[in-house]
Structures are given as C-alpha cells and as structure tokens.
Image (cartoon, helix red, strand yellow):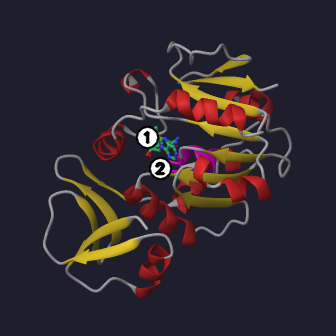
Amino acid sequence: MQSLMIHSKIPIDPVILEILTRVFDVQQCSEPCDSGLIYDEEGLFYKSLERGHIQFSFSELWQSHSNKKYTNSKEPLAKALGIKRAGETHVWDLTCGSGKDSILILKFGAKVTAFERNPSVAALLLLAQTEFESKSFEVHYGQASKHLKLLAINPPDVFYYDPMYPEEGKKKTALPRKEMQVFRELVGRDEDIEDVFDWAKRSGVKRFVIKRGVKSPTLKSKPSSQFVGKTARYDLYVFP
Ligand SMILES: C[S@@+](CC[C@H](N)C(=O)[O-])C[C@H]1O[C@@H](n2cnc3c(N)ncnc32)[C@H](O)[C@@H]1O
C-alpha cells in the first residue's frame, strides 16, 4: 500500500482518516514541514513553501458553472469526447489533477470516472469527492491501466487525457497560474505519454482524446480529427 505522510499538530478527523486509510498507509507526523500534506483546523491541504497551498472543492467547481449554459454541439471538448445528450456517455478522465476538467465534462452531461496517480493530489481529490454528492462522478487513486477490473465491469465510451507536458507553459491549462506551479512542484512532468496512448489503443476502448496547446505538435500518431478551442486543442483518436 502506498504510504501517505500527513503533518498535523492536532488529531486528524476520524472520518477523514477512514477515507484515506482505505487507499493509503497513512503516517502522521507532528513536526512542522515546509512543503507537504498538512492537516489543521482548515482541513487537509498541500502546502508548497513558495507557491501557496492547494485544496479542492468539487461543489465550488460545479457552482462556478452555474450561470453558464453549454451547448455540447458547440463545445470543442464535448464534441471531441462525443457527448451529445445527458446521461449517454461515460468518460474516463485519466488525469484528474484538480478535477476542473472532470467537473466540466460532468456538466456536459457525461458520467465521469477519474484517475489520479500522485498520492497527495489523489488524497485531496478523495476528500473532495465525499462532500460532493453525485452518482455520476467518482475518483480513483492510481493509473487507469492498473484498474483493469473496473475497465472490464464498466468500460467507458472514451478516454480523456491531459498530461503535464514539458512545454506546458504554452498550453492554457484548467489551472490558474499559482495552482499550476504547485502542481509542477508536486507532479513534475509526465514522461510516459506515448506509453499511456499505446495502452489506451490496446484497452478495447475505441475513443481517446488528448488535450494539447492550440499550436502544440500531435503525438507520434496522426489524430483522426482535431477540435480547436480558444485556449486548447483536443486531438481525437478513433481506434479500429
Ligand atoms: C495537467 S494535470 C491535469 C489537469 C486536469 N485536467 C485538471 O482539470 O486540473 C495532470 C495530472 O494528471 C496526473 N497524471 C498524469 N498521468 C497520469 C496517469 N497515467 N494516470 C493517473 N494520473 C496521471 C498528474 O499527476 C497530474 O495531477
């Protein structure tokens, strides 16, 4: 089991501990730390020495879309994912990150199963999930390729993939600048992009969408089609 260090001067809420110990071997430390997962009266958050801290709320993300009306036939991401009517499409978000794209996809009317392999980010996402009541959204710790049982039981219609590229600065991400910097510190770069693509191709799922900067190069393979938005491009691969 993956260990997860939490720095806290006060006892951790047993409900939070129960959620995290289902997935992690939680270690507690009462020493202060410059950067890491911290629990205090504000709850659990990740603190970065120079770049602030992060904590997620899916309810707030959902609320942030409350006065927006999306027409799926006009949204590049919804079109790339093939989402038409609500309740018809199941998306696996392979790179949950802050959950912003996941919640947008949920807003388009899809069911979303999201994956995050960074333990600290995943811990924050698992807690955010508990205060957000939705039967159509769930988060899992780890890579999607390690959740083969889930894939066999309830395969998605499409994979959505938004990795950290070396040239990430050129892509408008879902994250504000400061949050992105904390992510960079925590997660670094995703060096296995072509491997994830190869796994997706062999997985049996027919549709794969990768988010890119508007002018960024494609993967080694040529996409079946491209959907260009103001700030990002979505390359769609339809597998035979
Ligand atoms: C660019 S961020 C994703 C941003 C996200 N779309 C959002 O709305 O915030 C990439 C995230 O995906 C995670 N990640 C990258 N490759 C992954 C993989 N193969 N499986 C699970 N998580 C992955 C990284 O740890 C990082 O948190």
Disc ID at residue 15: none
Query: Could you tell me which quadrant the C terminus lies in?
Result: top right
Q: Nearer the viewer, residue 239 or 37?
A: 239
Residue at the image position 71 percent from the left and 46 percent from the top: 91
Q: Give the structural element (helix, strand or loop) at label 2.
A: loop
Position of 28 compared to 232: left or right? left
Residue at the image position 40 percent from the left and 64 percent from the top: 2
Q: Quadrant of residue 228?
A: top right
Residue marked by disc 2 = 98
Instruction: Report whether the residue tagged 1 is closer than 8 Å to ligand 1.
Output: yes
Residue at the image position 42 percent from the left and 31 percent from the top: 191
Disc ID at residue 175: 1
Q: Nearer the viewer, residue 237 or 179?
A: 237
Which amino acid is tagged 1?
Leu
Instruction: Report whether the residue tagged 2 is closer than 8 Å to ligand 1.
Output: yes
Res 151 seen here? yes
Magenta part of the protein: which range? 96-104
